[in-house]
Image (spheres, rainbow, N blue to C red):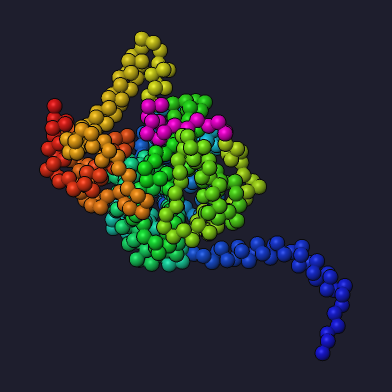
């Protein structure tokens, strides 16, 4: 049996479908996206001090991005020392910016874990949803369920196998990966994305993050690479840097692109050239974990945006000055010295502080080198200390050995600063070579007792 069709009516109906089609599709997509579960975010700035301005600026920018994307404050947990916005040295009191064209990114940011509460124990407790492990703070935790999506963004100083916290101890790679395994075993998330900005950040996951945990990681550098600060020496911030290269790259990309369409993979591909910076003053961003997750849209983790309404913050200067993250403190101190009037007390004090930091750097470099020469010989020492293991192998086999060697060194030679922690690889290689506690204790005592 044939059915007669009114051609005019059919054409009208077809026209309606074509006109309204995009709205129907958007409606279906929106309904699907709202069914994915709760979106959680943990944002961590792991430093303190004015010359580390950029870490808190990165985190505050990330909060504003997520908040505009529709994530609720009860699902965004912020770790920051909170000593920047109202720092006496801030030329814009109460304001933090993340690039030269940025609006204030500090206003409205939750103060969940600040000051002494910005520490590793609370960070682990928050991820695991374990309020009993917390010491102070807002007591907000990731109270997630099996259908939820978690985004963690950590911006900080790093070193081989470790990232810092404003309050000791630091976060060691083995501890972080164990926390992630426990979180997965609890079946309290569907997928997790972790962005890490720090020197040698790849070493936090290389050879350690198991596949099958439904976790995708992007790091700002390879396991043996430094990170880079950017937007340095801008206007009244000539003694500082407003952001880090990897961080501002993914943040500005997320502001600019339609996050319903832009995938994690596309973002990775778009920003890696900018972060590498033609091989000079840049680094190689890396991927770890379950790489199939990088096909997910950014909106699953960062919420939605309106690309046509993006601000001028995305028009970043192509000639922005980059500085090695470990040298930003020197930039700050040199600026203070040059700006102080000749013959003034300020000049003398600035010179004293600059000389002190340079002396501390020389001390730790020479001390570690000398210990290596005692343990492995004058010629072999530097080579052994600088060994970089092949990709897929963790920094060290015995993490307890590494932690104990760091403590032994510090007990004789003084605390490792964010600069000095670059030598953690040397201590790891001592452990990998079978050096015993009494051997490094004697070598460190001999080197630093005078």
Residue 375 located left or right of residue 202: left
Residue 301 located left or right of residue 326: right
**Rendered position, 56 above or below 361:** below
* Residue 443 horizontal/vertical position (percent): 15, 36
Q: Does the segment drawn in magenta span residue 323?
A: yes
Which quadrant would residue 318 be assigned to in this image?
Answer: top right
Residue drawn at 13 percent across, 30 percent down: 449
**Rendered position, 257 above or below 443:** below
* Residue 57 horizontal/vertical position (percent): 46, 39
Residue 425 located left or right of residue 319: left
Residue drawn at 44 percent across, 26 percent down: 239
Residue drawn at 70 percent across, 62 percent down: 22
Image quadrant where one finds the C terminus: top left
**Rendered position, 348 above or below 13:** above
**Rendered position, 38 above or below 120:** below
- Closer-to-camera residue (338/392): 392
Image quadrant where one finds the N terminus: bottom right
Confirm whether residue 119 shows in the render. Answer: no
- Closer-to-camera residue (254/72): 254
* Residue 316 horizontal/vertical position (percent): 57, 36
Residue drawn at 43 percent across, 67 percent down: 146
- Closer-to-camera residue (135/309): 309
Q: Does the segment drawn in magenta span residue 277?
A: no
Residue 170 located left or right of residue 309: left
Confirm whether residue 212 shows in the render. Answer: yes
Provide the residue span drawn in magenta: 317-331
């Amino acid at each position: 049996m044939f059915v007669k069709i009114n051609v005019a009516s059919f054409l009208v109906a077809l026209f309606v479908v074509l006109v309204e089609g995009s709205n129907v599709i958007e409606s279906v997509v929106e309904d699907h996206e709202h069914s994915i579960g709760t979106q959680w975010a943990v944002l961590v700035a792991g430093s303190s001090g004015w010359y580390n301005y950029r870490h808190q600026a990165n985190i505050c920018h990330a909060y504003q991005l997520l908040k505009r994307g529709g994530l609720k404050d009860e699902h965004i947990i912020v770790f920051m020392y909170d000593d920047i916005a109202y720092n006496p040295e801030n030329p814009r009191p109460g304001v933090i910016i993340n690039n030269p064209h940025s609006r204030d990114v500090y206003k409205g940011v939750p103060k969940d874990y600040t000051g002494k509460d910005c520490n590793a124990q609370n960070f682990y407790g928050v991820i695991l949803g374990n309020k009993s492990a917390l010491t102070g703070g807002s007591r907000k935790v990731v109270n997630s369920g099996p259908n939820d999506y978690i985004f963690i963004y950590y911006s900080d100083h790093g070193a081989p196998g470790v990232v810092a916290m404003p309050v000791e101890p630091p976060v060691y790679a083995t501890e972080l990966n164990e926390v992630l395994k426990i979180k997965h075993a609890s079946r309290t998330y569907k997928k997790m994305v972790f962005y890490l900005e720090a020197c040698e950040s790849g070493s936090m996951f290389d050879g350690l993050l198991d596949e099958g945990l439904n976790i995708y990681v992007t790091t700002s550098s390879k396991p043996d690479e430094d990170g880079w600060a950017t937007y340095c020496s801008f206007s009244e911030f000539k003694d500082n840097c407003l952001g880090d290269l990897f961080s501002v790259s993914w943040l500005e990309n997320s502001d600019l692109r339609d996050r319903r369409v832009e995938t994690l993979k596309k973002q990775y591909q778009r920003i890696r050239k900018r972060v590498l910076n033609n091989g000079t003053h840049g680094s190689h961003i890396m991927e770890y974990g379950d790489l199939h997750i990088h096909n997910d849209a950014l909106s699953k983790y960062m919420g939605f945006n309106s690309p046509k309404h993006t601000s001028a913050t995305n028009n970043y200067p192509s000639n922005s000055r980059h500085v090695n993250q470990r040298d930003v403190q020197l930039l700050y101190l040199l600026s203070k010295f040059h700006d102080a009037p000749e013959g003034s007390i300020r000049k003398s004090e600035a010179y004293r502080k600059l000389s002190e930091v340079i002396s501390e750097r020389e001390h730790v470099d020479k001390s570690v080198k000398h210990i290596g020469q005692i343990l492995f010989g004058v010629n072999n020492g530097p080579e052994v200390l600088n060994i970089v293991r092949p990709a897929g192998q963790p920094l060290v086999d015995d993490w307890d050995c590494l932690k104990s060697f760091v403590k032994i060194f510090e007990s004789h030679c003084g605390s490792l600063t964010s600069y000095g922690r670059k030598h953690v690889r040397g201590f790891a290689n001592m452990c990998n070579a079978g050096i015993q506690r009494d051997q490094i204790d004697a070598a460190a005592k001999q080197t630093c007792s005078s």
